[in-house]
């Protein structure tokens, strides 16, 4: 099955492009609101989205039990690296992962060598320094694993045989 590959974006971009379709009446209202607030249309859209972030409740059912505003959760989950965002979201509310992210999470969460704790997993028990220092190899292995019909993690022996030398990762077992 072919997957859609997105074009690589430069790492130094400060904004993202979002293309949306909206009802003509809503667009007219957006233009009026822009004039009233003396903002650009983009500024009004950003303001409206930020307002939604402040009012939307993010419920969780794990150790983070309770209700928190989405804006606060975003601050906790946002990381520059995609892999860190996936792990953070999976640990907080796994059901919000996309299909592709779920497959990546399956490989990461099922690979014992990436974690300091075998049972209870949290963001700090992921071996960030070791995994990120070997990122080109780890990324290649994860990409290969998610393309298989049955997605699973790697054993320590498999990682070593595939070119990830665990002896240089200084894993505290």
Image: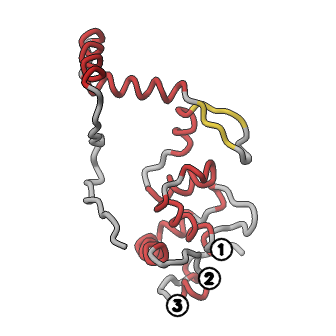
Which residue appears farthest toward the top when viewing the image?
36
Q: Secondary structure at mark 2?
A: loop
Q: Do the residues bearing badges 2 and 1 touch, measured as CB atoms within 8 Å?
A: yes
| Residue plotted at (27% across, 20% down) | 25
Residue named by callout 2: 155
Residue 74 in percent (x, y) is at: 52, 39
Task: Measure how far apart labels 1 and 3 are at the Cα level.
Answer: 16 Å
Q: Secondary structure at mark 3?
A: helix
Task: Measure how far apart labels 3 and 2 are at the Cα level.
Answer: 10 Å
Examine the rendered structure and indicate whether residue 121 appears above or below residue 135. above
Q: Quadrant of residue 14?
A: top left
Residue named by callout 1: 112
Q: Mark 2 or 1 closer to N-term?
A: 1
| Quarter of the rendering occupied by the C terminus | bottom right
Q: Mark 1 or 3 closer to N-term?
A: 1
Q: Nearer the viewer, residue 12 or 36?
A: 36
| Residue plotted at (47% across, 49% down) | 79
Q: Do the residues bearing badges 3 and 2 touch, measured as CB atoms within 8 Å?
A: no
Residue named by callout 3: 161
| Quarter of the rendering occupied by the N terminus | bottom left
Question: Badge 2: how crowded within 10 Å, few (<14), some, or many (20+)?
Answer: few
């Amino acid at each position: 099955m072919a997957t859609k590959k997105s074009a690589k974006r430069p790492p130094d971009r400060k904004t993202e492009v979002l293309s949306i379709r909206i009802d003509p009446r809503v667009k007219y209202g957006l233009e009026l609101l822009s004039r009233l607030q003396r903002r650009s249309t983009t500024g009004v859209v950003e303001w409206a989205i930020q307002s939604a972030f402040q009012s939307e409740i993010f419920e969780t059912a794990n150790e983070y039990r309770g209700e928190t505003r989405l804006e606060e959760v975003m601050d906790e989950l946002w990381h520059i690296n995609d892999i860190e965002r996936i792990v953070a979201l999976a640990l907080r509310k796994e059901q919000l992962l996309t299909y592709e992210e779920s497959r990546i999470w399956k490989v990461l969460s099922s690979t014992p060598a990436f974690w300091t704790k075998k049972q209870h997993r949290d963001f700090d028990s992921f071996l960030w320094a070791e995994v990120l220092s070997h990122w080109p190899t780890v990324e290649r292995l994860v990409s290969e694993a998610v393309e298989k019909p049955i997605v699973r993690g790697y054993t320590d022996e498999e990682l070593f045989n595939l070119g990830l030398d665990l002896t240089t990762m200084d894993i505290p077992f």
